[in-house]
Image (cartoon, rainbow, N blue to C red):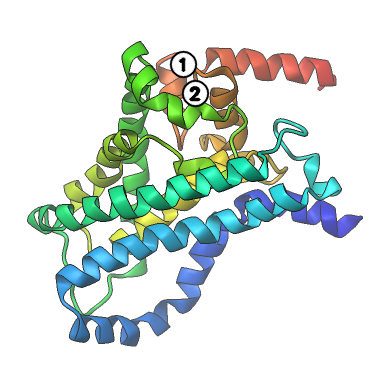
Amino acid sequence: SLWWWKLGRVWGAMILELTAIALALAYGLLEPAWQYLCHHTTEYTMTVAGMFISLVAGYLLGVVPYALLDLVRFRRIAQFKVQRDVYASRAQFTKVLLNIFACFFLVMLPMIALGTPVFRLFGMRRTDTLPHWATVTVQVLFFFVVEDYLNYWFHRWLHTPWAYRHIHSVHHEFNAPFALAATYAHPAEIVILGVPTFTGPMLVGPHLFTLWVWLMMRQYEAIDIHSGYEFPLALNSLLGFYAGTDHHDYHHHKYSGNFASIFTWCDRLYGTSEGYQAFVDKRRRLKGE
């Protein structure tokens, strides 16, 4: 029916779009709550707790829609699965969920707690006044660019024989990725890939609120490319330089190529998307496009 078709066309971009819309609509309402937190909590507590909640809440809010699709398996939605009829089992869901929460509390939380003094050293600040929405937007976009470039090279290193065998193979346990497994990885990989994530903020020295927004948006993006669903109006169909699900799904399926996690620039520039382009061209020919 028509409404199913419309759902399919907008679902892929929904996570990022709703985040931006919600922030725009709620921005005027955030100031009193922000000032209350500033007056009743220490900067250290607000930094650690806020960043951790941004990671966990952002992850859970982003995962839930895709997890429901994987569990319920609507017939009309299944046509948008990149790897048709390949779903994670409930046992795999449980295993990944336990791993992720262990990483959140045993790896990410200590990283944030230990890293907070470093963030302050590099200029991260908490003030009673929230930054202008344009400042937040520009800085977060800059963080995405920095993240993408550094992540590309860190990711390529993780595919060298030793690093892949001892670290990155955990993340590649599933050659058909699903949203919940976006952060499923060896603890060492989480620490290593935390460097690209926090390099942008350390170059800029952003407001604490901007850092919260960045971490949530980064989580949403990681979930989007690991979702396993490629909808007609997904973000990459609107922005040709955004990698998207199909781009990253190929990387998991073939275990190589398409190393960039956000944009397509690095893979095109350094020749690591040639296999994917050949794959896409062949798929189009078979479909008669």
Quarter of the picture holding the C terminus:
top right
Q: Is residue 153 visible?
A: yes
Q: Is residue 209 visible?
A: no
Q: Badge 2, how many Cα within 10 Å: few under 14, some, many 20+?
A: many
Query: Could you tell me residue 31's position as x and y percent?
Result: 32, 83
Q: Is residue 152 left or right of residue 13?
A: left
Give 108 or 225, whichever is nearer the viewer.
108
The residue under the point 83% across, 55% down is: 4
Q: Quadrant of residue 185?
A: top left
Q: Which mark is residue 169?
A: none
Query: Could you tell me residue 183's position as x and y percent?
Result: 44, 43
For the residues labelled 2 and 1, say whether their Cβ atoms are less than 8 Å apart. yes
Q: Which residue is mark 2?
A: 258
- Mark 1: which secondary structure? loop
* Location of residue 7 with respect to 142 vertically, above or below: below
Q: Quadrant of residue 224?
A: top right
Q: Which residue is mark 1?
A: 272
Q: Badge 1, how many Cα within 10 Å: few under 14, some, many 20+?
A: some
The residue under the point 69% across, 46% down is: 233
Identity of the residue furthest to the left in this view: 121
* Location of residue 26 with respect to 121 vertically, above or below: below
The residue under the point 18% across, 46% down is: 203
Query: Could you tell me residue 95's position as x and y percent?
Result: 53, 43
Distance from the alpha carbon under mark 2 to that under mark 1: 6 Å
Q: Which of pointers 2 and 1 lies earlier in the amino acid sequence?
A: 2
Q: Amino acid at mark 1?
A: Thr
